[in-house]
Image (cartoon, rainbow, N blue to C red):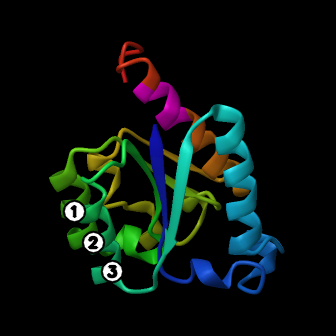
Amino acid sequence: MKILVINGVNMNMLGLREPEKYGSMTLKDLEKELYALSFELGIELETFQSNFEGEIVEKIHSANNGIDGIIINAGAYTHTSVAIRDAIASVNIPTVEVHMTNIYKREEFRHHSYLAPVCIGQISGFGENSYKLGLKAVVDYLSNDNKNGF
């Protein structure tokens, strides 16, 4: 089983960007933790980050070649990108939307996600654990062939 983790706009600034909200962990630190968890789960993991909407769309499209599940934190594109939403819908790969902060406790414009309706679930507000929970959820979803009624 191979899972793709996509990080969008500004996620490369983790560790520097608003540490009161996002902590001091860098994107590289987060990826190391996810790779360690993937080893425990017995799955293959690929990570990707881009600040460019079109590159994220292209990466989602290319996932049709061997990716079983996607974890995505599109950052601010969550609230603005119909293109990323349509890309997720076009590949028919189980996708979990994740956010480190609770988007519903933040500014009003962050309360709407264009991605959520085409994802199997959304996890927000648990910092780095949002990714770990998302990874476990998509692996469980794929392992159980959706028997849990998701």
| Magenta highlight on residue 138 | yes
Q: Is residue 65 above or below residue 147?
A: below
State if disc 2 and disc 3 touch (CB < 8 Å).
Answer: yes
Q: Nearer the viewer, mark 1 or mark 3?
A: 3
Distance from Cα at disc 2 to Cα at disc 1: 6 Å
The residue at the point 34 percent across, 46 percent down is 119
Q: List x then y, in percent, for residue 133.
A: 62, 40
Residue lying furthest top in this view? 147
**From this viewpoint, is residue 126 visible?**
no
Q: Is residue 31 above or below residue 97?
A: below
The residue at the point 44 percent across, 69 percent down is 74
Q: Residues within 10 Å of mark 2 (few under 14, many from 20)?
A: some
Name the amino acid type tagged 1: Ala
Q: Is residue 33 above or below residue 52?
A: above
The residue at the point 47 percent across, 36 percent down is 138
Distance from Cα at disc 3 to Cα at disc 2: 5 Å
Q: Where does the C terminus fall, quadrant-wise?
A: top left
The residue at the point 21 percent across, 44 percent down is 92
* Between discs 1 and 3, the one toward the N terminus: 3
SS at mark 1 in the image: helix
Q: Is residue 125 left or right of residue 75?
A: right
Residue bearing the label numbered 2: 57
Name the amino acid type tagged 3: Glu
Task: Name the dominant secondary structure of the magenta segment.
Answer: helix
- Find the magenta span and give its range: 137-142
Residue bearing the label numbered 3: 55
Name the amino acid type tagged 2: Val
Residue bearing the label numbered 1: 87
State if disc 1 and disc 2 touch (CB < 8 Å).
Answer: yes
| Magenta highlight on residue 139 | yes
Q: List x then y, in percent, for residue 85.
A: 25, 62
